[in-house]
Amino acid sequence: MKNLPIDWDSVPDVMNKDQFYRLCHISKSTALHLLKSGKVPCEWTGKKTRCYKIKKEDVKAYLEERAVYPELYSAPRGWYGGHYVAKLSKELPEDVLNQMHDYYAKLLSKYKDVVTVQDVVALTGYAKTTINNWCNRGELKSFRKGQLFYIPKIFLIDFFCSLTFRSITRKSLWHIQPLNDFQRKMKQKK
């Protein structure tokens, strides 16, 4: 099928993922890879549906760059079959770790100093059982009052910066978005 030229005047200034993949003639899975990996800049709204906001200028830049370097935008091996495992650098430089800590502290500034497991479930999208397991194993520092775990916010921030949290293979959507946002901010500072 021959791609027709795009009438950019009829394209909205900000679009969602559905509009993006249709405009670019790519699959939903490829669009998701491009947005999650940060190859196409976007804003994550935190909603369950229509959670990506993509600027028209970023889509134009993506299409122009893809025409010249299509290999830069291909999904990694295993992405389409559900077998993709991200490679993670185990060592983070001290200054990057400090900046990540500050980033998560700012992100969680509206939360109380001590949060419940249910608060962490609502924030991260991980299951209550998963978070309770992190607390039971001591990976997420917490204290118990009765049957409930309570997590000081400072320990939650430390956990978000830890290798244990960053190396989770099947990350929640919330987990991926702050990592991508942090990576974009680090690139802008350079």
Image (cartoon, rainbow, N blue to C red):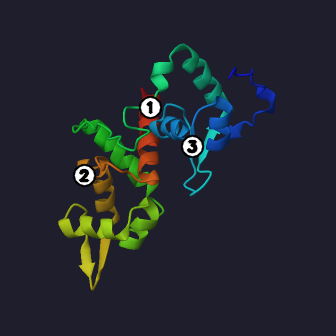
Residue drawn at (68%, 32%) of the image = 23
Residue under label 3, please give it: 43
| Relative to 11, 84 lies left or right | left
Q: Nearer the viewer, residue 78 or 156?
A: 78
How many discs appear? 3
Q: Residue 156 lies in what quarter of the image?
A: bottom left
Residue drawn at (33%, 56%) of the image = 157
Residue 46 numbered mark, or none? none
Dot placed on the residue nearer the N-terminal end, 3 or 1 = 3
Q: Amino acid at mark 3?
A: Glu
Q: Residues within 10 Å of mark 1 (few under 14, many from 20)?
A: some
Residue 164 numbered mark, or none? 2
**Residue 42 shows up from this direction:** yes
| Relative to 29, 142 lies left or right | left
Disc 3, SS: strand
Residue under label 1, please give it: 75
Q: Nearer the viewer, mark 1 or mark 2?
A: 1
Mark pair 1, 2: CA separation? 25 Å
Mark pair 2, 3: CA separation? 26 Å
Q: Residue 125 lies in what quarter of the image?
A: bottom left
